[in-house]
Amino acid sequence: MTEKYDVVIIGSGLGGLVSAIILAKEGYSVCVLEKNQQFGGNLQTFSRNKTIFDTGVHYIGGLSEGQNLNRYFKYLGILDDITLKKMDEDGFDRITFDNDPTEYKYAQGYERFKKTLLEEFPEEEKAIDAYCNKMKETCDFFPLYRLKLGKPYYENTSLFEVKIKDFIDSITDNKKLQAVLGGSNLLYAGEGERTPLYMHALSVNSYIESSYRCINGGSQITKALLARLRENGGKAFKRHEVTKFVTEDGQVSAVEIANGKTIKGDIFISNVDPKMTLQMIGENHFRKSYTKRIENIESTIAAFSLYLVLKPKSFKYLNHNYYHFKDYNAIWDAHKYTEESWPEVYMASMGIKKDEDEYGDNLTVMTYMRFEEMEPWINTFNTAADKNERGQTYEEFKQQKAEVVIQELEKKFPNIRDCIEAVYASTPLSYRDYIGCNKGSMYGFVKDANSPLKSFVSSRTKIKNLYFTGQSLNMHGILGVTISGVVTCSEILGGEYLLNKILEASNTERIT
């Protein structure tokens, strides 16, 4: 049986679903194909012991009235379907260190952010002002971040050559303040030698503007997106793994599905990692220089995540996240851990249930893990849709690593072990198999200030009717990937036309 659509989208991560809705709203017949049992990519949640865990969306920024993600979500028609809890306005993120009892708070809104930091660093007003101004100023260089038309951001290469560590070190000599200002860099896998300033600014700015948690998990965003897609005539199929792209006359004409179906289309959008996409199509369809460039882009480090089910009413709900480091000097080098020093950083975040905000029912802890540690099990594959065991040694590895992380947590929360009902863990292999990201990478491709254009991937590919979308394009995260969907669809619909539609929907001035 062969079906035919105007647009076929491979992968139902946020970038794929946003692209699908934009094009369906414009009258295109759209079909989204997902290999897993659950739609949503990193928006997926899972349930253990009747407790919902997020896999990727621990908090969302820029969702207050008039802010960027709020306006994009209004256009997509999903804002009213998402139940949110505003995080602690006086300290939504807290940066902490071993042997220092102080919690260094990031507050919401730049005025409050500055005031809160000044309480801990009263001598550093000039540096904190310089930091806040640079964050806002850097974001202004990215037109779609501000819902404006403008030159493509990558044309201003000098902006991409400044490293965030160098910038922070240039505004203050205070080692503690340097560490605090860079302290949430797990958000973008920051590395001192190469992470650009703009990556930090785009990641952190929207959280400073406003920070929210999704009540009962981020999969409600997926549900809302799927509902809007179907209302606009689009279709989405899970357990539809694309195994092959069929090409004719230099264009993609169809995709073949593992279940035997063939689905034809006029336009194809891949929400799958670009490296995997090229392998699926066949590298012979592209210039050698193009495939080599994509193959050689490094992917960001992977993650080990710990999911703790907490005993009822044993652990107070924390309306903030912790980014915890062993010391001030570790903040840009935590990815260089040794077996003995691991984990040098972790982020701890709590989920929230609809009817309960006094006590938490779960705690998620995330830290770096290099993909090489997966070497013994690299040839295994396991998802809910395709169950396979990785073996006893893998389970022992996870248990051992979980115990190390719990011991680290006990330094901060001495009674945590008594509150734990059950422990679950995921490794880089979990991300690789479910999300399809290269080597279980957390955030797509490494952005390197030393060679800024090396990791630039256009949404247009060298095949005329094939486009990319998703976190490897420009930015990761809910906002970054939403914008990637807009970037991809701008290639098809025209940038000015699409931006006007978005501005109209969010009751903002049209472009004149």
Image (tube, helix red, strand yellow):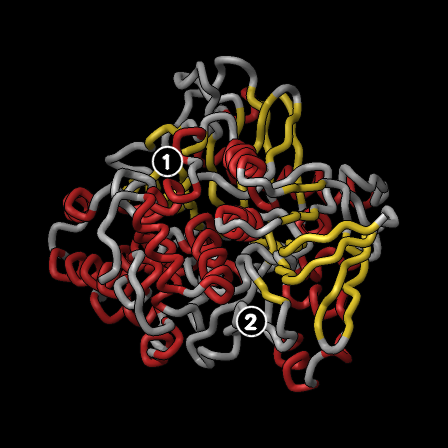
Residue at mark 1 to residue at mark 2: CA–CA distance: 33 Å
Nearest to N terminus: mark 1 or mark 2 = 1
Residue at image location 85% in from the left, 41% down from the top:
389
Q: Residue at x 55, y 71 (%)?
A: 460
Residue found at x 62% / y 77%? 462
Residue 62 position by quadrant: top left
User: Residue at label 1?
Assistant: 212
Is 90 rendered above or below residue 203?
above
Give the answer, above or below, for where 26 lies relative to 269.
above
**Left or right of 145: which side holds 17?**
right
Residue 179 x %, y %: 33, 57
Give the x, y percent position of residue 433. Answer: 73, 50
Q: Position of residue 496 (x, y in %)?
A: 35, 63
Q: Amino acid at mark 2?
A: Arg
Nearer-the-camera pick, 154 or 493 = 493
**Figure label count:** 2
